[in-house]
Image (spheres, rainbow, N blue to C red):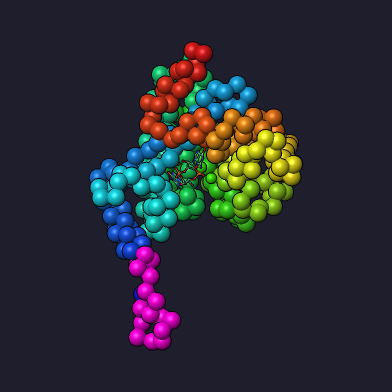
Amino acid sequence: AKSAGGNRFELADPEADARAITRHGLTTALPAALDRGEFFIEYQPLVHLGDGSVRGAEALVRWLHPQHGVLGPDQFIPLAEHTGLIVPLGRWVLEQSVRQARAWQERHSDAGPLRINVNLSPCQLTHPGLVQDTVDILEREGLDADALCLEVTESALIGADDDLLKPLRRLAEMGVDIALDDFGTGYSNLANLRRLPVSILKLDRSFTQSMQQFPADPVDLKIVEGIVSLAHSLDLAVTVEGVETGAQAEQLRILGCDTAQGWYYARPGPPERLHELALVDATG
Ligand code: C2E
Ligand code: CA
Ligand code: CA
Ligand code: CA
């Protein structure tokens, strides 16, 4: 970025330029990547804090780029949102994940129903096909709506009007759980929770990080305790993300959190990994 003008406009930033070029390249490659099957999904177990059993998994999308190798969602989801590819990509993720959940259920009927959590981008929320696509996929793959949880970030729902909430309400009525993702980062009005069709709060990783020392900072403890008791009084379950140590898991369990997810239990991995974890779990 330079101009013929004064000095301060001539400061080229080669790194920023390189990033812009990469971003442009990735953006133009996105649609073909979906056609070529370059995306894949890793699954990270969701564990019941009370008894340690695997209850399901969150689907996390990755892109195996022919030149750049494996790219994480933070590197391409914003681009997919910007170009609109997020709608077909999101539909693909939902379809794959629902099919996978069905396969788990067939192999682990004794392990209790394994649930699948899928992230929804705000762009998918405003897309008119969301409810019908979801109904179609569940029906085609033969999965109960009860086994599906859609995760929507708190920031996507801040100040949401009824038009935005309507599709989520319809899905919730069908039995799909809606989780409020990254909760605690969006400064939403807690009283507002009552009007949202959510049944799960996913407490942001920053809270888990504050539980690193044992005992944790008393103020942090109070905040989490308050969120959990408010959530439970509204009949919402609490999931915590980013649990990396046993000490964190123990603190969060004592504070009343219901479900946990994080490297302490397992990193995101291929679907077979969940088979193994659920199996070990079911047989003791
Ligand atoms: P998220 O929904 O908050 O997902 C949790 C992120 O935390 C994942 O990063 C996961 O790999 C990471 N994580 C899990 N356990 C730990 C832990 O113990 N410690 C630490 N430090 N990190 C942990 P990932 O896979 O890079 O995904 C990043 C974000 O991309 C997700 O954040 C989600 O917002 C978005 N995303 C992923 N898949 C999809 C998708 O299919 N559709 C949409 N719209 N967004 C997606
Ligand atoms: Ca999520
Ligand atoms: Ca349900
Ligand atoms: Ca998060």
Does residue 175 show up magenta in the picture? no
Give the residue at x 42% y 21%.
276
Identify the image quadrant of the N terminus.
bottom left
Counting from the top left corner in percent of width and height, residue 250 is at 64, 29
Give the residue at x 54% y 35%.
244
Q: Quadrant of residue 274?
A: top left
The mark tally for this picture is 0
Magenta residues, start to end? 2-17
Depicted 226 relative to depicted 100: above or below: below
Does residue 4 show up magenta in the picture? yes
Give the residue at x 25% y 45%.
36
Counting from the top left corner in percent of width and height, residue 2 is at 35, 78
Instruction: Report whether residue 169 is seen.
Output: no
Instruction: Report whether residue 269 is seen.
Output: yes
Counting from the top left corner in percent of width and height, residue 168 is at 55, 44
Give the residue at x 52% y 31%.
264
Q: Quadrant of residue 142?
A: top left
Query: Closest to the observer: 241 or 209?
Result: 209
Residue 12 is left or right of residue 152, and the answer is left
